[in-house]
Image: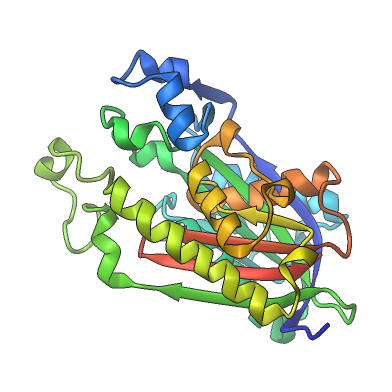
Amino acid sequence: MKFFRRFKILGTGSFLPEKVLTNHDLEKMVDTSDEWIKTRTGIEKRHIAANNEATSDMIFAAAKDALKNAGLAASALGAIIVGTVTPDTMFPSTGCWVQRKLDIPGIPAFDVSAACSGFLYGMEIATSMLPSIDKPILVAGADALSKITNWQDRGTCVLMGDGAGVVIIAPTTEDRGYLSSLLGADGALGELLIQHAGGSRMPASHETVDKNLHTIDMKGNEIFKHAVRTMGDAAVEAIAKSGVPPDDIDMFVPHQANHRIIEATCRRAKVPLSKTHITISWHGNMSAGTIPIAFHDAVSKGIIKRDDKVLFAAFGGGFTWGASVLVF
């Protein structure tokens, strides 16, 4: 095998908030039904962060889990990279707040804003930094989408959940790491999935709050079409670049936004659903958190084992996308 970048995953971790919101709960909030949500998305429930629970709090809990699984002290880390679109604050970065909670000043810590592709973007940056840092790097994907969801909009509120996943990677001479990795974006499609207010284009005001412009605005049907094509194409390209036949992929861990998108990606990439780790039913769409949380779930249950070839693929607002083939 020809490796694009060698690295070893030392540990994984995740965190899901205690509060669970079921489809039956949503039936009491908006005009929807459990059957409608399950049929169209595959989602049955999602976790919701507490009022005083921010993205960095979730990452901190997931990081402690990952450090324990890696057998590392936080002081061993050489960098912190966070993929998120729901930062604690616009600045400092959520990465810096996580660094403060872990009490490891001095190392680089920053955020990556690539929506649902944020974890794969973070991994690409982290693996490129490893040769110069030469210490383990913590990569997190986490979002508290409930904080920016309009709970009267049945088209979006049934989809979103909160959670954090963490992976700790380190340099290695072993035959493991990326066989292929690719990223992409098309800003021309940005307005199909957007949080209009809160940035420099539309600063917060009474009007923006009254009009719910700080919440997720999504053109669902258009996004579905682009997601099916783009995520599928990215997966196909990553497999082709890896030199691994689709039949030799041991497990596919996709972004968990919609079961039908996952099914379409599997057909396009020629990877069967039986080799796809799907967790969307119990956590919904957590944006950058979905892939690392699903990956941790598969690793912790022994579904993914050492030396397995794992395919990742994601698509998100921006529009952004990414895919990779990893030897675990």
**127 horizontally vs 247: left or right:** left
Can you say which quadrant of the picture contains the N terminus? bottom right
The residue at 80%/49% (across/down) is 299
In this figure, which colouring scheme has been used for the structure? Answer: rainbow
Q: Within the image, what quadrant is residue 139 found in?
A: bottom right
Considering only vertical position in the picture, is 266 above or below 302?
below
Residue sitting at x 47%, y 60%: 315
Look at 44% across and 16% down and name the residue there.
25
Q: Position of residue 277 (x, y in %)?
A: 69, 47
Mark yes or no: residue 100 visible.
Answer: no
Q: Where is residue 165 in the image (x, y as percent from the top left)?
A: 64, 49
Give 144 or 267, whichever is nearer the viewer. Answer: 267
Left or right for 178, reference 214: right
Q: How many marks?
A: 0
Pick the residue in front: 196 or 314: 314
Rendered-image quadrant of the C terminus: bottom right
Judge from the rendering whether residue 82 lies leftward or rightward of residue 326; answer left or right: left
| Residue at the (42%, 50%) spot, across then down | 86
* Residue 194, quarter of picture: bottom left
x then y, percent, for residue 180: 67, 78
Q: Can residue 273 be seen in this view?
A: yes
Q: Toward the viewer: 72 or 139?
A: 139
Where is residue 109? Give x, y as percent. 57, 67
Given the current orientation, which residue lies at the most extreme left position?
207
Residue 221 relative to residue 175: left or right: left
